[in-house]
Image (cartoon, helix red, strand yellow):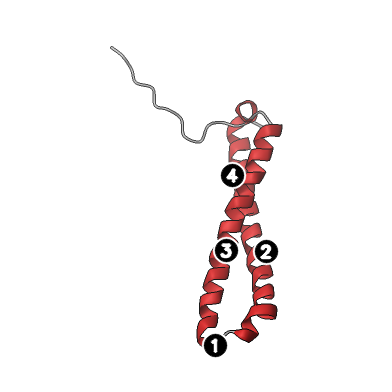
């Protein structure tokens, strides 16, 4: 496999990881919210709780993604296996 294919597969895998962690976080936070907090909150305020759960799941997924990426970068030489996503454009001098 070449560097470009490795980069594409890494981006797809990282995106899939981020989405799965966000969905799992949403499910876990919703279960905790429904079991412990929802019975004590009025029905009008429960919609706010689900909005906060959604945002918390997204924030948690980004935090876990950063930790996983830092761990991976410490274990693997990224320049050896991956192409840069954004390359610098070379300016021709006359």
Relative height, residue 62 to residue 33 (above, below): above
Q: Earlier in the sequence, mark 1 or mark 2?
A: 2
Residue at the disc numbered 3: 56
Q: Are marks 4 and 1 in contact (CB under 8 Å)?
A: no
Residue at 68% in and 39% down: 71
Pinpoint residue 47: horizontal percent, then vertical percent: 52, 79
Q: Are marks 1 and 3 in contact (CB under 8 Å)?
A: no
Pinpoint residue 32: horizontal percent, then vertical percent: 68, 73
Mark-to-mark CA distance, 3 and 4: 23 Å
Mark-to-mark CA distance, 4 and 1: 41 Å
Q: Quadrant of the N terminus?
A: top right
Residue at the disc numbered 4: 11
Q: Earlier in the sequence, mark 2 or mark 3?
A: 2
Q: Nearer the viewer, residue 33 or 23?
A: 33
Q: Earlier in the sequence, mark 2 or mark 4?
A: 4
Q: Quadrant of the C terminus?
A: top left
* Residue density around tag 4, few if under 14, some if 14–19, many if 20 or more, within 10 Å: few
Q: Which type of secondary structure does the marked residue at label 3 adopt?
A: helix
Relative height, residue 68 to residue 81 (above, below): below
Q: Nearer the viewer, mark 3 or mark 4?
A: 3
Mark-to-mark CA distance, 1 and 3: 20 Å
Q: Which type of secondary structure does the marked residue at label 2 adopt?
A: helix
Q: Which type of secondary structure does the marked residue at label 4 adopt?
A: helix
Residue at the disc numbered 1: 43
Residue at 55% in and 81% down: 46
Residue at the disc numbered 2: 24
Q: Earlier in the sequence, mark 1 or mark 3?
A: 1
Pinpoint residue 67: horizontal percent, then vertical percent: 64, 45
**Residue most toward the bottom?**
43
Mark-to-mark CA distance, 1 and 2: 24 Å
């Amino acid at each position: 496999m070449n560097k470009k294919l490795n980069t594409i597969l890494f981006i797809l895998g990282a995106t899939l990881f981020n989405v799965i962690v966000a969905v799992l976080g949403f499910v876990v936070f919703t279960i905790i919210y429904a079991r412990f907090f929802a019975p004590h909150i009025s029905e009008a305020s429960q919609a706010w709780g689900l909005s906060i759960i959604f945002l918390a799941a997204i924030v948690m997924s980004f935090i876990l993604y950063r930790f996983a990426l830092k761990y991976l970068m410490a274990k693997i030489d990224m320049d050896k296996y991956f192409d840069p996503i954004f390359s610098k454009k070379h300016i021709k001098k006359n």
